[in-house]
Amino acid sequence: MALHSLVRWLVVITLAASVINAYRGWLGARPFGAGSRRLRMATVTIAHIQLILGICLYIISPVVKYFLENFGTAVKMREMRFFGMEHSSMMLLSIVLLTIGSAKAKRKSTSREQYKTIAIWYSIAFVILFFSIPWGFSPLTHRPYFRAF
């Protein structure tokens, strides 16, 4: 699904921007304003849209179908295991961490605590997400950087 491939760039860009913004705010003692709130919410919203696209793709994917129907054999095959199990579980974990981090940050009483919470939770989510994407340079498996519609 080309849309899933395209939206990954929005996720990576907004998540990277959120992490940078959070560290700058936390270490620079900046107020947590409307722009930071919008960026926090946009990051989580785009990640959730990507999750929905990913679930749809998971349901219709012939690779995943093969993985589930031939688990014993498929689990020994790098690409089948990656898309059937590793990619989906790590991406879900990443989005859960983003969601928890966003909710926790929203409840913090000071700007510094909000930024710190986002910096920590989003950074962990970013590392997991980044290494779970099938980049062209990934040793796990790869896909084109841009897929045609």
Image (tube, grey):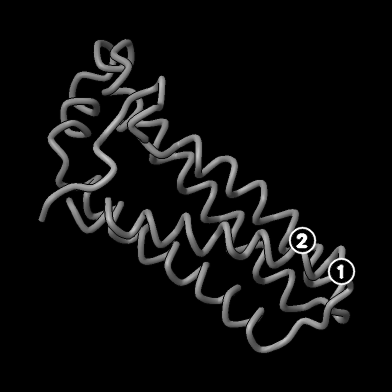
Task: Tally the numbered discs.
Answer: 2
Nearest the eye: 44 or 55: 44
> Neighbour class for label 2 at 10 Å: few (<14), some, many (≥20)?
many
Nearest the eye: 20 or 82: 20
Residue 128 at x, y = what percent?
56, 40
Circle 2 is placed at which residue position?
Answer: 23
Q: Earlier in the sequence, mark 2 or mark 1?
A: 2
Residue 111 at x, y = what percent?
84, 78
Circle 1 is placed at which residue position?
Answer: 28
Q: Amino acid at mark 1?
A: Gly
Residue at point 29%, 53% (across, down) = 55
- Which residue lies most toward the bottom here? 34
Q: Is residue 28 above or below residue 20?
A: below
Asked which quadrant contains residue 3, the reply is: bottom left
Residue at point 23%, 55% (across, down) = 56
Asked whether, in this view, residue 5 is left or right of residue 103, the answer is left
Q: Is residue 110 above or below residue 117?
A: below
Q: Which mark is residue 78?
A: none
Residue 123 at x, y = what percent?
67, 50
> Neighbour class for label 1 at 10 Å: few (<14), some, many (≥20)?
few
Residue at point 65%, 69% (across, down) = 102
Nearest the eye: 30 or 41: 30
Residue at point 87%, 72% (across, down) = 112
Circles 2, 1 touching at the beta carbon (< 8 Å): no
What secondary structure is found at the residue carrying circle 2? helix
Quadrant occupied by the C terminus: bottom left
Q: Amino acid at mark 2?
A: Tyr
Residue 52 at x, y = what percent?
32, 61
Nearest the eye: 80 or 9: 9
